[in-house]
Image (tube, rainbow, N blue to C red):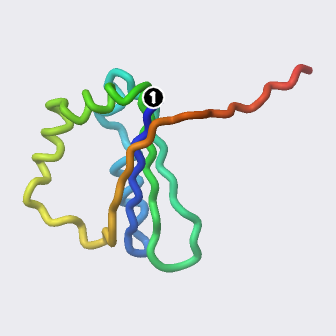
Amino acid sequence: MFVQMKKIVVTEGNAEQVINRFGGKGIIEKQEGFIDSTVMVKKSRRGDEEVIVMIRWEAEEFWKKWEKSEEHIAGHKANLGKPKPEYIVSSEGGLYEVKAVKNAVQQQI
């Protein structure tokens, strides 16, 4: 399994903007090898909000295929030259190869 992680820090009250962008329907879920996408918001009382987007793929080659796809490139070209939204404080990402997974043990009744 292969995972793409994005950490996006936004100004207070704007996490919903990122949630809507990455949590709504799109074309990525139709891509071969796509497993799922999870959007999480760090619990905090006040101040900037941290949103984590985790996208899981069956293997790295499926992610690479998506990155090079016409649909993905077109989406980025549509925003080319546009300034990033003012509410975004910072953004960073990483790529991870999954080495171990634990699942819940199902108890017999």
Name the residue that disc number 1 marks: 35
Residue lying furthest left = 81
Please state the horizontal and vertical placement of residue 81, each as a whole percent of the image. 7, 59
Please state the horizontal and vertical placement of residue 40, each as a whole percent of the image. 51, 53
- Taking the spot 33% from the left edge, 50% from the top edge, the residue there is 21
Please state the horizontal and vertical placement of residue 29, each as a whole percent of the image. 36, 30
Q: Quadrant of the C terminus?
A: top right
The residue nearer to you, when weighing 89 against 25, is 89
- Taking the spot 60% from the left edge, 34% from the top edge, the residue there is 100
- Taking the spot 14% from the left edge, 53% from the top edge, the residue there is 79
Relative placement, left or right, of 67 versus 81 is right
Q: Residues within 10 Å of mark 1 (few under 14, many from 20)?
A: some
Amino acid beneath label 1 = Ile
- Taking the spot 45% from the left edge, 45% from the top edge, the residue there is 54
Q: Is residue 105 above or below residue 9?
A: above
Label 1 SS: strand
Please state the horizontal and vertical placement of residue 101, each as a whole percent of the image. 62, 33
Q: Is residue 42 above or below residue 48?
A: above
Residue lying furthest bottom = 47
